[in-house]
């Protein structure tokens, strides 16, 4: 006789099952009502995660919806809604009117909305007025292809006030410098700010935030001038830009800045007071930046002169991550300038070098740090193609020199395409 199968999932508490249902795509969550009477009430009592977009059905956000379906879901579910996501990146007959979006956001099911993703289709449309009703609940917000009112725009209601917002993403939006300043002023506990390919009314944007801890800028199409005027809690700046992007960033006051990257060979232009960097090259250095402890370089040539200038600029670096290009230059700095080595105090604890090729210039580069970094604990060499144990053994012999630190771990890692 076959053993009877036990439905262990249905025996879980309602709170756990509700969390499971809320993590499912919206249509799948609604279908759980058909499983059994045990599940019938769960969808209506679980926090709603509603995703509306015009992409293919296998999109990670879930299946597409028509406007009528969204209205029906919102009327059938009493709330609360944890996340409402609307993303229209392409023209589609599913595209709702601005009036429909505004009506959805006024639904009682969204009263306690915590996360909002609102991506309009071109042309950039103004934010719906109903958005302001989430000022006391919204903790994460992403806005794309929309326009922001100026802080003094009484006709548009002025700047958004989001006093509990912790994460903000702006993607391809139209926003002036004064509007951004007013927006940040209305987010007094903001922790994370992501700026993607943004179109600006003015080319100069100022960051003033008493709470901001992380800024990420991904610029692809236009020039950008970003001034971090006053960010006392800022710990991380992450930059992502293509080679032809003109990005100028000035850091006036960010005393806790500890993580910086990715600096490339020629972009961005980064200024700390009177110290100027052009990509990974130190152009002028009047004062060292003592707070930075982690530095990431991308698409750079392995040049000891440039690396040592960076160590002087950031004298308290503990971790250095380099994504090297295939083009190398000779690295004989420590041979031609032996008298200058003694003045260096390299505090690096970990180095990650991607695209290590085992050429003479790469070996010289690595050996310099093995010989002079007294606190070095780990050196990770990421190789695109590790083919033979013989190659690794030869590299280990080439790097087997007297180390300045006590037994640093040198490891070879195979590069994995993502």
Image: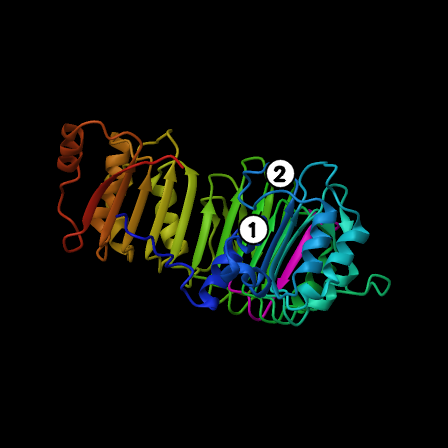
Residue 415 lies, with reference to residue 53, above or below; the image says above
Q: Nearer the viewer, residue 49 or 344?
A: 49
Residue at (66%, 72%) from the top-left corner?
136
- The location of residue 80, given as percent across then percent down, is 62, 66
Give the residues in magenta.
199-213
Determine whether the residue tagged by mark 1 lies in a helix, strand or loop.
Answer: helix
Residue at (76%, 46%) from the top-left corner?
96
Q: Earlier in the sequence, mark 1 or mark 2?
A: 1
Determine whether the residue tagged by mark 2 lies in a helix, strand or loop.
Answer: loop
Q: Which residue is situated farthest in the right direction here? A: 155
Residue at (41%, 54%) from the top-left corner?
313
Residue identified by numbered label 2? 55
**In the image, is residue 207 part of the stretch drawn in magenta?**
yes
Q: Is residue 328 among the parts visible in the rendering?
A: yes
Label 1, residues with CA under 10 Å away: few <14, some 14-19, many ≥20: few
- The location of residue 162, given as percent across then percent down, is 66, 68
**In the image, is residue 6 part of the stretch drawn in magenta?**
no
Q: Quadrant of residue 58?
A: top right
Residue identified by numbered label 1? 31
Q: Nearer the viewer, residue 286 or 51?
A: 51
Q: Is residue 127 among the parts visible in the rendering?
A: no
């Amino acid at each position: 006789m076959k053993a009877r199968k036990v439905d262990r999932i249905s025996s879980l508490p309602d709170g756990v099952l509700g969390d499971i249902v809320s993590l499912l795509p919206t249509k799948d969550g609604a279908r759980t009502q058909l499983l059994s009477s045990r599940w019938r009430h769960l969808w209506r009592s679980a926090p709603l995660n509603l995703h509306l977009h015009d992409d293919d059905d296998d999109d990670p956000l879930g299946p597409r919806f028509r406007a009528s379906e969204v209205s029906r879901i919102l009327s059938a579910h009493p709330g609360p809604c944890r996340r409402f996501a609307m993303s229209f990146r392409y023209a589609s007959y599913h595209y709702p009117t601005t009036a429909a979006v505004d009506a959805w956001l006024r639904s009682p099911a969204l009263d306690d909305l915590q996360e909002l993703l609102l991506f309009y289709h071109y042309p950039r449309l103004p934010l719906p007025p109903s958005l302001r009703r989430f000022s006391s609940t919204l903790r994460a917000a992403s806005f794309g292809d929309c326009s922001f009112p100026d802080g003094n725009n009484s006709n548009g209601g002025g700047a958004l006030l989001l006093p509990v917002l912790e994460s903000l993403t702006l993607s391809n939006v139209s926003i002036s410098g004064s509007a951004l300043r007013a927006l940040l002023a209305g987010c007094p506990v903001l922790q994370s700010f992501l700026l993607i390919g943004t179109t600006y009314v003015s080319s100069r944007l100022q960051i003033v935030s008493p709470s901001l801890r992380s800024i990420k800028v991904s610029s692809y199409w236009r020039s950008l001038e970003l001034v971090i005027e006053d960010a006392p809690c800022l710990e991380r700046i992450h930059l992502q830009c293509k080679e032809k992007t003109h990005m100028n960033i000035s850091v006036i006051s960010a005393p806790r800045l500890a993580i910086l990257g990715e600096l490339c060979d020629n972009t961005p232009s980064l200024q700390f007071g009177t110290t100027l960097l052009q990509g990974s090259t130190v152009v002028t250095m009047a004062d060292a930046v003592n707070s930075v402890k982690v530095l990431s370089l991308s698409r750079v040539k392995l040049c000891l002169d440039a690396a040592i200038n960076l160590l002087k600029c950031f004298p308290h670096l503990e971790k250095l991550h380099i994504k090297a290009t295939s083009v190398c230059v000779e690295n004989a700095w420590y041979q031609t300038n032996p008298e200058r080595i003694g003045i260096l105090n390299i505090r690096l604890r970990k180095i990650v070098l991607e695209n290590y090729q085992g050429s003479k210039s790469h070996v010289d580069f690595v050996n310099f740090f093995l010989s002079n970094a007294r606190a070095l604990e780990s050196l990770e060499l990421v190789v695109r193609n590790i083919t033979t144990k013989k190659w690794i053994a030869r590299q280990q012999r080439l790097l087997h020199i007297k180390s300045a630190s006590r037994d640093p771990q040198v490891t070879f890692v195979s590069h994995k395409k993502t």
